[in-house]
Image (spheres, rainbow, N blue to C red):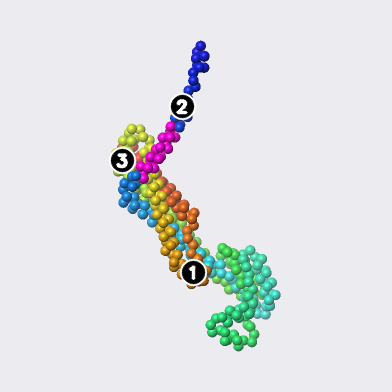
Amino acid sequence: MNTVRESRRPPEPPKTQRSEGRKVGAWREHHAWSLSISWRRLAARPLSTLLTVAVMGVALALPLAFYLLLGNVERMGDALGRNQSISAFMKPGQNAAMAETAASALRGRPEVADVVVRTPKDGLDELAEVQGFSGSLQSLDVNPLPYVLSVQPRPGLAAEDAGRLVDAMKATPGVDMVQDTGAWRQRLDALLGVGTRAVSLLAALLGIAALLVVGNTIRVDIQSRSAEIGVLLLIGASRPFVRRPYLYAGIWLGFLAGVLAVVLAVVLELAMAGPVGRLAAAYDGSVSFGGLPAWLLLSVPVAAALLGWLGARLVSARQIRRAAAV
């Protein structure tokens, strides 16, 4: 009989699934509430929030400004001579066939993008266009200029590879002299390397400064609500439950600061566009202005929000632990 009665009982609902579903729902509701209440708390003290966001935004905008400057210096170097052609002057008495043979040998090298053979007549015509030379050139019976190989290095060629190319050009049969700006190229590469390292260190230091600003703001907020936090802990609230609104406050502060940093960087780009445009016109358009890439501008608010969360996480954990111990 007992067996029959037990078989007729309806199956009990799985309590574990219902409890897990309720926990997940409560977790979501508390996250939504924490997101909302943290925003309302920041809006309740607009001056303090504005100052915090402004300090963090300026700190995050400085690395973007230096990154923009460094990128345009590198672009200007490329336009004004970083990849400038290297000239190889052939020995006197070399004819067109010998010059073309030397050019073919250089075209086969991986460091070379192109080789142009300039005849003595081409050189004479260029000198004739220079003011004050046309009359003197008409009195010459024989063209004294040699053949010149204008070698264009591959774009982005490193200084070491450019040095090897110059050595190979000097060793080419029939070449008398090689004119290169290798020393200038090496100085530019070294300068850009120092600038890149400086921008990285500056970004790290200012990121730490932004983290400390958020941490101090959250610390002051927690201290002003220490009595409220103590009551919540006494009635059984967990530390993550109490800490969650302050974490969202840090995320809000970091995100808003990142948006402000992007706005400042875009304003800086617009301010530089006019002077750079005039500079480009002076160099016949060979110099161009490049702005910050879109992926960088989009990633700054996200990275700033993570910094804000980290600063709030470090400070709130310690402050709430101290409140629980009191």
Q: Earlier in the sequence, mark 1 or mark 2?
A: 2
Residue at the top extreme of this rendering: 1
Label 2 vs label 3, nearer the camera: 2
**Tag 1: amino acid:** Ala
Is residue 75 a member of the stretch shown in magenta? no
- Span colored in magenta: 22-39
242, 5: nearer the viewer? 5
**Tag 3: amino acid:** Ser
Mark 1 closeness class: few <14, some 14–19, many ≥20 residues within 10 Å: some
Mark 3: secondary structure? helix
Counting the numbered discs, the total is: 3
Q: Earlier in the sequence, mark 2 or mark 3?
A: 2
96 lies above or below 301: below
Mark 2: secondary structure? helix
Instruction: Give residue 280's mark.
Output: 1
Provide the residue designation for mark 3: 226
Residue 144, quarter of picture: bottom right
Is residue 24 a member of the stretch shown in magenta? yes
What percent of the width, then of the height, locates residue 39? 36, 45
161, 5: nearer the viewer? 5
106 lies above or below 294: below
The residue drawn where x is 33% and y is 32% is: 235
The residue drawn where x is 55% and y is 81% is: 130
Provide the residue designation for mark 2: 15
Report the Cα–Cα distance between label 1 and label 2: 73 Å
Left or right: residue 313 versus residue 189 is left
What percent of the width, then of the height, locates residue 1? 51, 11
Residue at the right extreme of this rendering: 97
What percent of the width, then of the height, locates residue 53? 36, 52
Report the Cα–Cα distance between label 1 and label 3: 60 Å
What percent of the width, then of the height, locates residue 244? 39, 41
Q: Earlier in the sequence, mark 1 or mark 3?
A: 3
